[in-house]
Amino acid sequence: MIKRLIKRIFFILIGIFLIYVIFSNIGFFQNMVDGNNASIIIDADTGNEMDDLFAITRALLEDDIEVIGLTSAQWFNHPDATDSTVWVSQQLNDEILRNLKMTHIPHPMGANGPLRYWGNPVPNRSPAANYIIKRADELPAGEKLNVVVLGAPTNLASALILKPEIAGKIKCYLMGLKYDPMLRVWNKNEFNTRNDLDAMDYLLNNEQLEMWIMTATTSAELVFTKEEIFEVMEGKQGIWEMLVNRWKSKFPDHQEWIMWDVAIIEAIIHPDLATVREIYVPDENTQRKVHVYTRINAKSMKKDFFKTIKEYI
């Protein structure tokens, strides 16, 4: 009798817990960009590796997402860095849009270096930062501009420093930082963060800015193989040839690649494929909570990516 009662109580508690989990995530899903032709600006350091190209292409092919801007970001802290890394990103952004016949989408160039003066950040002005300000200013009261940052956050941080009052009108989706959900420990030793630490700190410290962070820790679960990509895209023209050639020229000996940036795009399009938690920012930053993707369904994300690609080939 007692065992039966304990068992019943156990299942009741499990049921209550599951109900709590479901309803606690509803707020997250409702606040995310999910359909209804939501609009986004993508800010990408397209020139440094290759996952940016795949992520941008995926976003541009999504019917429920309207890309209203594609801005270029710098990546100066890289072994292959040129004198103008942002120009390399800009050229690739232009080529992506040409291949998809989407050059009507605004694609202003970003800053070629990080914020200046440690401890007292000075904005690095650029057409990209000005464009973010312009689109935020145009929004009706109560609406927010979705800015998806795939590289160093220089352009968004510069826009906010130039016009601080737009912070409350922006929802920032950012690929960067590292976070261990088990140990609850942040780590800023990550490529995008290191390309502009002052900009990252500025965003984390800005209590008016809504942030959704896909960490390098979580997104590392999404891996594409060279065989998978080439089987679908090789021999095709346009954007597909561009993506295949990027892999061949940039990392010819790599048989697989982590698609960090694809992970955040897929999470935006399909919120149900990611787990989100509200977590306090690193201790050294102004203490507030941000939304952090702590898990992703990498298998389903990959399946959705290739399903979408095959529909357009």
Image (cartoon, rainbow, N blue to C red):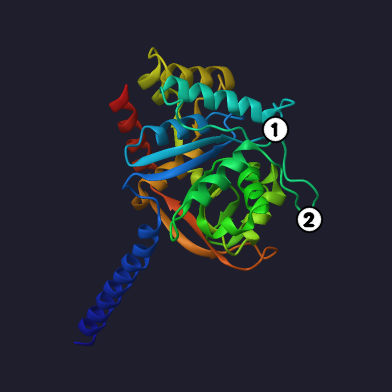
Would residue 163 appear left or right of 293 to someone viewing this image?
right
Mark 2 in CB contact with mark 1 (< 8 angstroms)? no
Would residue 262 appear left or right of 250 to someone viewing this image?
left
The residue pinned by badge 1 equals 78
The residue pinned by badge 2 equals 120
Q: Quadrant of residue 298?
A: top left
Q: Position of residue 19 (x, y in %)?
A: 29, 70
Q: Residue at x 57, y 63 (%)?
A: 208
Residue found at the far bottom of this picture: 2
Q: CA distance from mark 2 to mark 1?
A: 25 Å
8 up-or-down from 282: above or below: below
| Of the pair 66 and 15, the residue shown nearer to us | 66
Q: Quadrant of residue 129?
A: top right
Visible residue check, residue 144:
yes
Helix, strand or loop for disc 1: loop
Helix, strand or loop for disc 2: loop
Which amino acid, mark 2? Asn
Sequence order check, earlier mark of 2 and 1:
1
Visible residue check, residue 190:
no
Q: Position of residue 161 (x, y in %)?
A: 67, 53
| Of the pair 82 and 108, the residue shown nearer to us | 108
Q: Quadrant of residue 241?
A: top left
Which amino acid, mark 1? His
Q: Position of residue 94 (x, y in %)?
A: 53, 24
Would residue 269 appear left or right of 254 to someone viewing this image?
left
Q: Position of residue 225 (x, y in %)?
A: 44, 28
Q: Residue at x 52, y 50 (%)?
A: 136
For the C terminus, the image quarter is top left
